[in-house]
Amino acid sequence: MADDLVKLKEQVYVDPRPAEAFDRYHARTREKEPGPAYEVVRGLTTLLAATFYRGRAYGTERVPASGPLVIAPNHFSNLDHFFMGMGIRRKIHFMAKSQMFVSPIDKVYANGGTFPVRRGAGDAAAFETVHAILDRGGALGMYCEGGRSRTGKLAERAKPGIGRIALESGATILPTAIHGSSHVRNVKRGQFPRITVLFGAPLRYERLGPGNVGRDDARIVANEIFDEIKALYAVVEAGGRDAARAWRPAA
């Protein structure tokens, strides 16, 4: 239940630093795939997920092995980044709030393929970085809900950003459910929820190119993607891992 969750700290949405302060992180991500930090962190967090959280991923065979890809899960926890990468070999770039990019941890983020977004600022640089990743056939993790859900429940609707990316890029979109991570914050109480990840059926939209997608169209597509995520989440919520293991896309 949502009322048994440890409370999250209040969010800080405005980063007072100028956009230029983040140029070096975007430049690194646009030009290079994630470096050694990615594998080190993935190894450690996969071990953490498998042991403490008894994490399992299903439908990994539906993750395209190559080509531009956006993995789109629900978002409850800061560990969702790592649960998302559990069980797949592709290196995934992540977009993270700019407030996280402070020395010295910023070097780990940058080398690990993470780049900043200045929330509430209409951050054009972040979208340019997204397109650079996808144009070279890379993989990106992007949350339909934007920030973490603070209620322990899925949001009512998606933010339009992922719809915009889907239509501008034409990349494969992979709806994904991460079940159990709403209670990861309860580690403060000694509770380690069981994490189940279910990858859905890939979605593809006609590529319209940057600057050619209206907000209404972006919102429609974002909600279509989020509806798929909600359906996958409901499968695990109702039937657990047996249902996740058995789930297949409709013919």
Image (cartoon, rainbow, N blue to C red):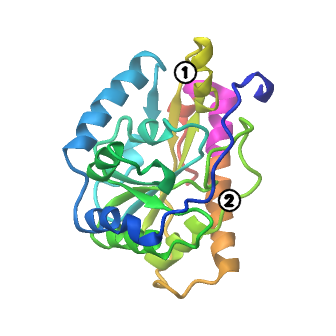
Q: Which residue is mark 2?
A: 158
Q: Residue at x 69, y 42 (%)?
A: 10
Quadrant in the picture for residue 171: bottom left
Label 1: few (<14), some or many (≥20) within 10 Å?
some
- State the image coordinates of residue 185 (x, y, percent, origin top left): 60, 27
Q: Which mark is residue 194?
A: 1
- State the image coordinates of residue 75 (x, y, percent, origin top left): 59, 44
The quarter in which the N terminus is drawn is top right
Secondary structure beneath label 1:
loop
- State the image coordinates of residue 195 (x, y, percent, origin top left): 53, 27
Amino acid type of the residue that numbered disc 1 sits on in the rendered structure: Arg
Q: Which mark is residue 18?
A: none
Q: Nearer the viewer, residue 144 or 35?
A: 35
Majority secondary structure of magenta residues: helix
Residue range (magenta) = 231-242
Amino acid type of the residue that numbered disc 2 sits on in the rendered structure: Ala
Magenta span includes 148: no
Residue sitting farthest toward the left = 36
Vertically, is 236 above or below 88? Answer: above
